[in-house]
Image: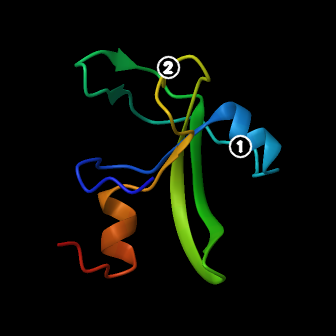
């Protein structure tokens, strides 16, 4: 899911494990969710190559515990990714 309102890219731990992404490094900060609850991420993955429509992009993800995100998605590409790929967002 794309979300221009999110400052970070998010993936839940279950999907990270299933996609065999590398183990995250400790996160240097906490994350404030949209409902204003502060949570400590599982960690941070930097310089990860992902493919969107067969186009490779290098990005970073905040990894959250499976029970923190209770939505219909398990990965969110936020404003940082939109900026990195110079996406026209209108």
**Colouring method of the image:** rainbow
Left or right, 62 with respect to 51, comes to left
Question: How many neighbours does mark 1 have within 10 angstroms: few (below 14), some (14-19), or many (20 or more)?
Answer: some
Left or right, 15 with respect to 45, comes to right
Q: Which residue is mark 1?
A: 16
Picture coordinates of residue 57, whole percent (x, y):
56, 77
Q: Which residue is mark 2?
A: 68
> Where is the C terminus found, in terms of image quarters?
bottom left
Residue in the picture at 32% in, 53% down: 3
Residue in the picture at 53% in, 50% down: 61
Q: CA distance from mark 2 to mark 1?
A: 14 Å
Picture coordinates of residue 15, whole percent (x, y):
70, 40
The tally of labels here is 2
Picture coordinates of residue 40, whole percent (x, y):
46, 22
Q: Residue furthest left?
A: 90
Q: Nearer the viewer, residue 46 or 2?
A: 2
Q: Is residue 76 above or below residue 50?
A: above
Residue in the picture at 31% in, 82% down: 86
Residue in the picture at 62% in, 23% down: 66
Disc nearer the start of the sequence (2/1): 1
Helix, strand, or loop for circle 2? loop
């Amino acid at each position: 899911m794309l979300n221009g309102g999110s400052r970070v890219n998010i993936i839940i731990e279950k999907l990270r494990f299933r996609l065999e992404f590398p183990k995250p490094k400790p996160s240097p900060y906490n994350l404030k969710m949209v409902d204003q609850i502060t949570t400590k991420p599982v960690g941070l993955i930097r310089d990860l190559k992902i493919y969107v429509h067969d186009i490779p992009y290098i990005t970073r993800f905040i990894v959250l515990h499976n029970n923190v995100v209770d939505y219909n998605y398990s990965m969110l590409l936020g404003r940082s990714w939109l900026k990195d790929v110079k996406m026209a967002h209108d």
